[in-house]
Amino acid sequence: MINVSQTAASKITDLLAEENKQNSGLRVFVQGGGCSGFQYGLMIEDAPGAADQTFESNGIKLYIDPISIRYLKGAEVDFVENFAGGGFTIKNPNAVTTCGCGQSFTVEESDQGESHDSHHHA
């Protein structure tokens, strides 16, 4: 469901080895914010939470919470070298619009049940 590119996998393996966390996995999540509505997050975690789905790709364990999984189906974690020194990026086929920084995206919402009422009546 979610893949890690070979390049990203070797970088993550190096990171885990540096921190003596060879048995840990990578949490991939989506959070509100960013210039297109959502941004991705990556975090090293020792173990998945109770509700997480766990995937394995190129030897890397991935932990994804039930909300983020809706936005990350078929995505790939990649590592790109760039002028800023390189970093992890997520290639997401579900993203409808992405902004220039590649860190945030929007998706077409299928369920309209999430309306936020910001008006407070005294």
Image (tube, helix red, strand yellow):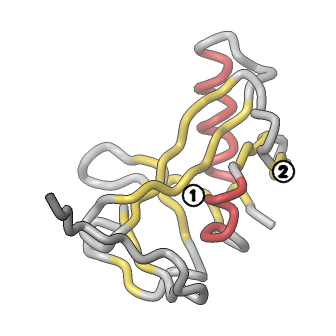
Left or right, 34 with reference to 3: left
SS class, disc 1:
strand
Q: Residue at x 37, y 66 (%)?
A: 104
Left or right, 109 with reference to 26: left
> Where does label 1 land, which residue?
78
Three-letter code for the amino acid on which mark 2 is drawn: Phe
Q: Residue furthest top?
A: 20
Which of 102 and 105 lies nearest the eye of the viewer?
Answer: 105
Q: Residue at x 74, y 45 (%)?
A: 62
Which of 72 and 33 lies nearest the eye of the viewer?
Answer: 33
Look at the picture and state if 93 lies above or below 38.
below
Q: Residue at x 66, y 27 (%)?
A: 45
Q: Position of residue 69 (x, y in %)?
A: 69, 62
In the rendered structure, find residue 55 and report the number of the disc placed on it. 2
Which of 65 and 98 lies nearest the eye of the viewer?
Answer: 65
Which of 46 and 115 lies nearest the eye of the viewer?
Answer: 115
Q: Residue furthest left?
A: 122
Look at the picture and state if 91 lies above or below 22.
below
Q: Residues within 10 Å of mark 1 (few under 14, many from 20)?
A: some
